[in-house]
Amino acid sequence: MSEESLSYEESRFLTRRLFILKGGLVTGFSILSWRLWQLQIDQGEQYSKLSQGNRIRLQAIASPRGIVYDTNGIVLAKNISSFNLAITREDVRDPETVLKKVSHVLKIDYKSLLRQLYKNKYAASYEAVILYQNLTWREVVLLNTYQQEFPGISVEVLPIRYFPLQQSLSHTLGYTRQITREQLKKVDKKKVKSSKFIGQDGIELTYNKYLIGQDGGRQVEVDSAGQVIQTLHTVNPKVGDDIYLSIDSKLQQGVERIMEGTKCAVILQNPNNGAIKALVNKEEFDPNIFSKSIKEQEWYRLKQQKILQNKAIQGIYSPGSTIKMAIAFAALETGLINASSTRLCEGYLRVGKQVAHCWKHSGHGSLTVEQAIKHSCNVFFYHMGLELGISTIHEYLTKLGLGRVTGVDLPYELSGILPSKNWKKSYTGRSWLTGDSLSVAIGQGYLSVTPMQLLHYVSCIANNGYTIPPRIVFAEGIRKHVTNDANFSLPKNLEAPVLLPIDCQQETLRLLRSGMIKAVQEPHGTAGHANSSIVPIAGKTGTTQVIGHKTRNRLIREGKMERKYENHAWFVSFAPSDNPQIAGVVFLENGKAGNVAAKYMKKILEFYFTEIEPYNKKA
């Protein structure tokens, strides 16, 4: 059966439809061709650059901080790897949606992730922003396994600080924490990545300049989700400089064991070169908690309880009777007294209507300066305070380094107070009184010091009259990794101990040392609890009031006397007494009496001269 031909009308209709269809196709291809020309020819260079920018990326590599060692090469601070959750905003269209997925899979609070994202909203869009620190290995595996589900998300590996001894030496070493905006402004551009976490206290802060290394970098190819396809080129980072301390960690831990259960500050120093051998603060903290994300409540607790305070350089207390050698120094140097001069102690001294008592109510009788130090006679030093006057006392105590910071290489050192007439007038608006001089002469009243200051002045007595800034790091304690680094330099005060002689007579120092030896080694000396059969020790006790006698007696009567109201206890010393190799200070917060501190110092020095530097008695 033959097919029926199309009528004229049907043929014309079909032809018109084909023409319209061909016209549409031509128009469409024309538009497409024009757009391709525009993209490839007119805007080709622009889009080529954008394409290249999205494909090739430069990534900074953080350098590990230098390692901190003790004097014997024991590691005190090193680095471990931390896996951190990061996002690169340039690689993700909808970061909120991606973060919800991450939150769901890793069980991390979504709001905290979002908060970190907004906190870094001004960072460059191509820069990886850390949202969460210290991912577990399971979390890292989950992210890497399903990385296509999380565009823009990556795992950043950064070195963080680890302190193997944990709480030991925490106040000396300090801790590292995320850098602040103000600190970031001062960082060398070559060290920005390596400065994400920097020292915020202690040695870690003081020597940041040396411990921070130099950034490295790599050129990588990434896909549309920001995932690395391949590494094209790498420049390795330069590791920070290692530092060796004068601290002996074996001695440090031995002292910490001896002082367990106390609230104290203990410092041991070589008086001949200023090297700090141990620096103990109780209570300690674990600096490793700062390398991670410390919780707000934990930070608040540490601040409220003042656990982060380094009592050795920031604790300000009345020195009590430990100041009596300094008062004697002033009296001997001015010629007010000499070796044979005496003053009478009847158990009290009446000054006008005021009666100042000695701790021994029956009195000590007539005493020379050596005997006054041995027996810690208050009345003898009341006489010195009145006869010298506060201006002279201020002048000579300044010579011994009191009233100003010692210059130890730790941050935030305080100076205490060395009062004067002008100081009291400006501070209180009142004039200096006779009673003020009496109080200062026995280490009470307006006078206040830090444990480091007391040790500094006692070391002057031990080393025959030299003030030496205490140091924890010397020039040889910093080792360079890159010997040809033209920018590497050391502070001049690290090159060698700075020995500054005090303008004084050797006889003055001999008498002061003799008084301290008698206080420990002779019968009835107030520091007899420190007398040792292992090594000869010289020392001086001190007891300072927290509350007045009347208040104390009332609290005792009412049964309300608590530990926090007990007196503070001091003991300063050096040994061997005939050839000092170590000087030390023990401060016991609410330790009741100086003889308690003396007992602890005896244990410490015996440990030192048996376990650290064995002492050989002369035949």
Image (cartoon, rainbow, N blue to C red):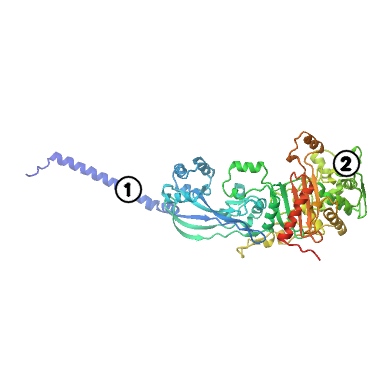
Q: Residue at x 57, y 54 (%)?
A: 194
Q: Bin the neighbour count of mark 1 within 10 Å (Cα to Cα): few under 14, some 14-19, many 20 and up.
A: few
Residue 319 in sight: no
Residue 257 in sight: yes
Mark 2 residue type: Ala
Front in this rendered view, residue 146 or 281: 281
Q: x and y percent of residue 586 in the render?
A: 75, 50
Q: Which mark is residue 434?
A: none
Q: Is residue 26 left or right of residue 94?
A: left
Q: Is residue 604 left or right of residue 59?
A: right
Q: Which residue is mark 1?
A: 32
Residue sticking out furthest to the left = 1
Q: Residue at x 60, y 63 (%)?
A: 482
Front in this rendered view, residue 393 or 616: 616
Q: Bin the neighbour count of mark 2 within 10 Å (Cα to Cα): few under 14, some 14-19, many 20 and up.
A: some
Q: Is residue 313 left or right of residue 539?
A: left
